[in-house]
Image: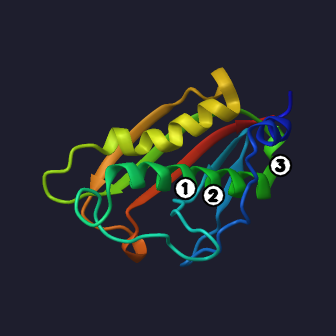
Amino acid sequence: MTVSARLTELGIELPPVVKPVAAYIPAVRTGNLVYTSGQLPMVDGALPATGKVGAEVSAEDAKEFARTCALNALAAVDSVVGIDAVTRVVKVVGFVASAPGFGGQPGVINGASELFGEVFGDAGAHARSAVGVSELPLNAPVEVELIVEVQ
């Protein structure tokens, strides 16, 4: 089954590629790898929420935002090589704007990791970092980067 067919089966439509907010491109291919820039949980050009996870944003909402970041990352990959060229998710890096004392970064970034498992099955299992940070661009609560292997 192709990746695009699996997305359809799951009822998932990739969003438009998020317009960069600074001097970078959404994704770049080198050899058989595609690296995405950090993707915020933008929906229709806007953040659905801002602030720190564990204060203004709940961990449950942040997990959903991480899923949105992951979808935005897949859209960026699709714009470079076509989503059906992806053979494996290699690495996920997630950043969580964290309130003091919040230690649930791994659970938040599971929103992205679980999506990759749903879409790619065993090929969605990946190496990962989940990092708490004091601030993210535009006061976003979460940001996700992706590295995928392609044909």
Q: Residues within 10 Å of mark 1 (few under 14, many from 20)?
A: many
Q: Residue, x 32% and y 48% (percent of image)? A: 131
Work out how far the residue at label 1 is from the one at label 2, CA to CA, in angstroms: 5 Å
Callouts 1 and 2 close, C-beta under 8 Å:
yes
What amino acid does circle 3 point to? Gly
Q: Position of residue 148 (x, y in %)?
A: 65, 39
What amino acid does circle 1 point to? Cys
At mark 1, the secondary structure is helix
Q: Position of residue 147 (x, y in %)?
A: 59, 43
Figure quadrant of residue 44: bottom right
Which residue position holds label 3? 82
Q: Nearer the viewer, residue 125 or 66?
A: 66
Q: Residue, x 44% and y 36% (percent of image)? A: 128
- On screen, residue 118 versus residue 144, left or right, reads right
Between discs 2 and 3, the one toward the N terminus = 2
Callouts 2 and 3 close, C-beta under 8 Å:
no
Figure quadrant of residue 58: bottom left
Which residue position holds label 1? 69
At mark 3, the secondary structure is loop
Work out how far the residue at label 2 is from the one at label 3, CA to CA, in angstroms: 14 Å
Instruction: Return the mark for residue 35.
Output: none
Which residue position holds label 2? 72
